[in-house]
Amino acid sequence: MTETENLVKRLPNDIGGLPAEPIQQVDHQLEPWEKRCHALADVLDFHKIINTEEKRCGVEALGAEMIGKLTYYERWIVAFANILFRKGILTPTELALKMKEVEARWPEGVGSPPNGRNVK
Amino acid sequence: MNQPDQSHGHDRDHAHEHPHAEIGQSERPGYYDIMETAVRELLVERKLIGPDEIRRQIEVLDSRTPALGAKVVARAWVDPAFRARLLADGRSACEELGISFYDDTGLIVLENTEKVHNLIVCTLCSCYPRPVLGLPPDWYKLKPYRARAVSEPRAVLAEFGTMIPDDVEVRVSDSTSIVRYLVLPTRPKGTEHYSEEQLAALVTRDTMIGVVPARAEIGRLAQ
């Protein structure tokens, strides 16, 4: 089998049966934004805006490089944005402007929010 | 959310001056954090989702832990009629115990026996019986487990310290977005006198994924 043939037969998520490293029994407490992202996925599913299979396909459509480099919930939120663009629910410009607005809630160059607590 | 900050504690100089200050976002949010906030706020502004729905769903997620699955397993161990209903229709049997399914997923409960050991996986992503177990551990979502569980389950089980005798069949079930699985482990020997509550305490998350068997407490075995 050629190298490209394998790419055609296996999309990035389709890894069942491939050789892989030993299992590291890792886990982590979700960050607040990760938990919000998970809840958002459920709510999008409840409203039939994005279902679980669309989400999975949306992650796969990010391509192997992003799948490899982004973390689990990073992949989810980027996939949601792309799916919402594709469905005409949001536009990239609207999201970019809103992200700028959200970011502006934290003063430029300051590494912590207004109350200044819990700085790493 | 009210998730206490576990990594760096309170600012000792100021915490007492702001006893009611919210424990929350501790630093400038990252790119993906901002993206999540932006997507959510846009959807709320357009009334596609309600302003309180994310918070409410976080409460639902927080309410789901392996203790729910353990309650189901313990009931199945003590009540043969319930076990039969559970194996026939996992979802409705769980609902009987007051465990609601907040999504459209079906649940198939796989019974371990002396001759069959079950293991669950989601090779394509991370599908998991969340209504009864909560969120999956990271290792369940990562490549080594997803890739190898279906092709060399005995080697995978051995990495969890679980040795399955050759005369016991290993069955691996691959979850989908709408069909989820839960393993019903075998009841440990020597637990005949245990109460349902004591039995539930032996049922861990990993026993219901199928990577380890349920065991009577080591302390009790030693007695």
Image (tube, coloured by chain):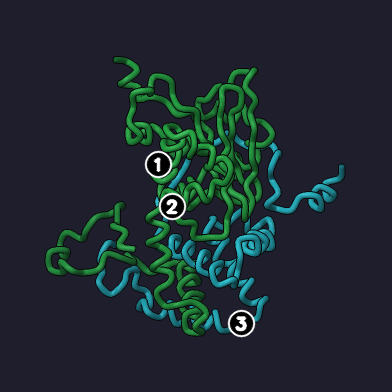
Look at 16% across and 65% down and name the residue there: B14
Name the residue beneath numbered marker 2. Answer: B99
Is B28 drawn above or below residue A52 in the view shown? below
The picture places residue B34, in percent across and down from the top left corner, at 46, 71
- Report, in whole angstroms, how far the alpha carbon at label 3 lies from the one at label 2: 39 Å
The subunit letter for the residue under badge 1 reads: B
Spot the green chain and give its letter. Answer: B
Q: Are marks 3 and 2 in contact (CB under 8 Å)?
A: no
**Earlier-in-chain disc, 2 versus 1:** 1
Q: Amino acid at mark 2?
A: Ile
Q: Colour of chain A?
A: cyan
Q: Which quadrant of the view contains residue A30? A: bottom left
Name the residue beneath numbered marker 3. Answer: A91
Look at 45% across and 27% down and name the residue there: B187
The subunit letter for the residue under badge 3 reads: A
Q: Which quadrant of the view contains residue A32? A: bottom left
Is B174 drawn above or below residue B95 in the view shown? above
Q: How many marks?
A: 3
**Is disc 2 on the same chain as disc 3?**
no
**Residue A113 in sight from this viewpoint:** yes
Look at 49% across and 67% down and name the residue there: A40
Can you tell which mark lies on residue B71?
1
Q: Amino acid at mark 3?
A: Thr
Dot 3 falls on a residue whose secondary structure is loop
